Image (spheres, coloured by chain):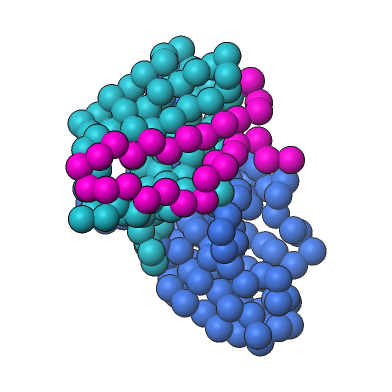
């Protein structure tokens, strides 16, 4: 079974330029997550989708970041314009969307996109 | 303020010995906890989890212990192998909620 696919793997841009990341989740996974991981830190949630609906975007800096998940399958995350502080790894994850006290909704991560803003 | 803390940024152990990775949390509303393992240039991969109604979960060489009164969990790897060398993230979540990750602990297992 194919895992979570992300592209590009690496991206170098100059500040103030736009950039976009793409994610294709595991087939059948209803929930999709975008995370930001700075060096030496754990992943931090940016946005969570249940199918095509963004159910939690409270941590997404909406002045420059946007995301979409058309048709509830793959997703794109965009930054416009990029700033120096946006240099980080952007991780996409997906899960079935089932959770409860006895059941953890295991998240499967893609390899990430390493963004460098010069 | 960090809700999930991994206070040891790194840990070095000898092959065959036990590795113990620790994690503390502050939010008593968390009701499940997970450990993820991450190799360089790869995304984190799920390792083991535990719900708050249990105090131990075991899977092969990996055991997670949960002490709710102390808001502390630990991951034990016995015996440690060189292939276990990676960054280990502790994560916590609530029902229907999002995961909160610690900063990670880099484990080095020396042959």
User: Can you tell which quarter of the image residue A110 is in?
Assistant: bottom left
**As drawn, is A98 to the left or to the right of B110?**
right
Q: Quadrant of residue B29?
A: top right
x and y percentages locating residue B7 in the rendered image: 57, 42
What residue is rendered at 47% in x and 77% in y?
Answer: A10
Q: Is residue B58 above or below residue B102?
A: above
Along the line of sight, which residue is nearer the eye, A113 or A88? A88
Count of labels in the image? 0
Q: Is residue A96 visible?
A: no
Residue B25 covered by magenta stretch: yes
Position in image of residue B93 (x %, y %)? 55, 31
Span colored in magenta: B1-29
Q: Is residue B10 magenta?
A: yes
Q: Is residue B22 above or below residue B71?
A: below
| Nearest to the observer: residue A13 or residue B42 | B42
Write the residue at 40% across / 23% down: B65
**Which residue sits at x=34%, y=32%?**
B76
Instruction: Quadrant for the C terminus of chain A, please.
Output: bottom right
Percent coordinates x, y for residue B86 in the rendering: 36, 54
Residue farthest to the right, as pictured:
A63
Q: Residue at x 26, y 55 (%)?
A: B110
Picture colour for chain A? blue
Q: Which chain is cyan?
A: B
């Amino acid at each position: 079974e194919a895992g979570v696919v992300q592209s590009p793997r690496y991206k170098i841009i100059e500040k103030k330029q736009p950039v976009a990341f793409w994610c294709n989740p595991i087939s059948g996974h209803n929930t999709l997550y975008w995370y930001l991981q700075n060096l030496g830190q754990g992943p931090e949630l940016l946005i969570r989708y249940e199918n095509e609906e963004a159910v939690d975007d409270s941590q997404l800096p909406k002045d420059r970041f946007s995301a979409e998940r058309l048709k509830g399958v793959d997703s794109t995350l965009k930054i416009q314009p990029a700033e120096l502080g946006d240099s980080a790894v952007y991780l996409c994850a997906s899960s079935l969307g089932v959770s409860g006290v006895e059941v953890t909704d295991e998240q499967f991560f893609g390899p990430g996109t390493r963004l460098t803003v010069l | 303020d960090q809700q999930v803390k991994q206070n040891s940024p790194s840990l070095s152990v000898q092959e065959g010995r036990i590795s113990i990775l620790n994690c503390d949390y502050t939010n008593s509303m968390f009701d499940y906890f997970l450990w993820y393992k991450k190799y360089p240039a790869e995304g984190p991969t799920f390792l083991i989890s535990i719900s708050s109604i249990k105090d131990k979960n075991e899977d092969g060489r990996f055991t997670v212990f949960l002490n709710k009164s102390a808001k502390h969990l630990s991951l034990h790897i016995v015996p440690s192998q060189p292939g276990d060398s990676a960054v280990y993230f502790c994560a916590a979540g609530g029902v229907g909620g999002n995961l909160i990750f610690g900063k990670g602990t880099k484990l080095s297992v020396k042959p």
